[in-house]
Image (cartoon, helix red, strand yellow):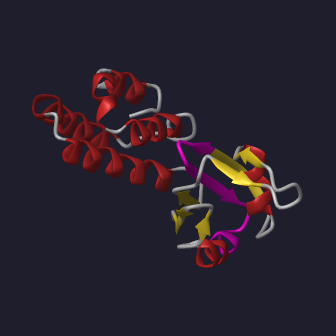
Amino acid sequence: MTGRQTPTMLSNFARLRYLNPRVWDRVNKLFDHTTVDGTVARNTEAALTVVGATRSREKFDEAMEKLERHMVKRSKFNMKVSNIPSTGVLTETGKETKIGYQNMRDTFGQFGMVKDIILVQGTAYVQYAKSKDSKKTTKLIDNMQMGNNIIRATTTF
């Protein structure tokens, strides 16, 4: 199933976004960068139909996280970093600032050549030019404290 067909299918379940807006928004953003296998799309649709009837956040999270893992594996991104805080303190000025795309690009660029990054809902999907750089970065930053958050980093290939 192509990326265009799946968001249409997923939009039929937009009323369920309230169960976990963060994971819903992340998955929807990934549709700009990858497609979904037809079997996975059908399984997700079936799971979300059950969620629609039961309103189970646990089942919703399970279905959406399974879809997210599938999409990330099919995408160009080779690292996922989650639990990134929305603000941070600049070391140069001591002022609090919103963490955005450029901050992430600068930070991850210290570990290797970054080809692309998307940042959505406290999660960054990073594409390094070399997979060894994503492995090295993951080992260095997984479980690192960033502000008050403990960030999680995983390779995605």
User: Compared to 47, does 62 lie above or below?
Assistant: below
Could you say which is closer to the camera, residue 97 or residue 143?
97
In the picture provided, is 26 more to the left or to the right than 147? left
Residue 139 on image: x %, y %: 59, 78
Q: Is residue 8 above or below residue 48?
A: above
Residue 95 in the image, given as x and y percentages of width and height: 80, 50
Residue 75, compared with residue 5, is above or below; it is: below
Question: Residue at 47% of width from left, 32% of height from top?
Answer: 3
Camera sees residue 76: no
Q: Residue furthest front?
A: 94
Q: Which quarter of the picture shows residue 91?
A: bottom right
Q: Which residues are magenta?
A: 119-134
Q: Specify whether 93 is left or right of 67.
A: right
Check the picture and name the quadrant holding the N terminus. Answer: top left
Question: How far across and down, in percent of the image, does residue 73 sit?
Answer: 47, 56
Q: Quadrant of residue 100?
A: top right
Q: Which residue is more in the foreground, 92 or 1?
A: 92
Can residue 38 be seen from the camera position used here?
Answer: yes
Q: Picture coordinates of residue 114 (x, y %)?
A: 76, 58
Q: Residue at x 28, y 25 (%)?
A: 13
Q: Quadrant of residue 131?
A: bottom right
Residue at 50 percent across and 35 percent down: it is: 31
All told, the count of numbered labels is 0
Residue 124 drawn in magenta = yes
Is 29 left, or right, of 88 in this rendering?
left
Q: Is residue 128 magenta?
A: yes
Q: Nearer the viewer, residue 39 or 105?
A: 105
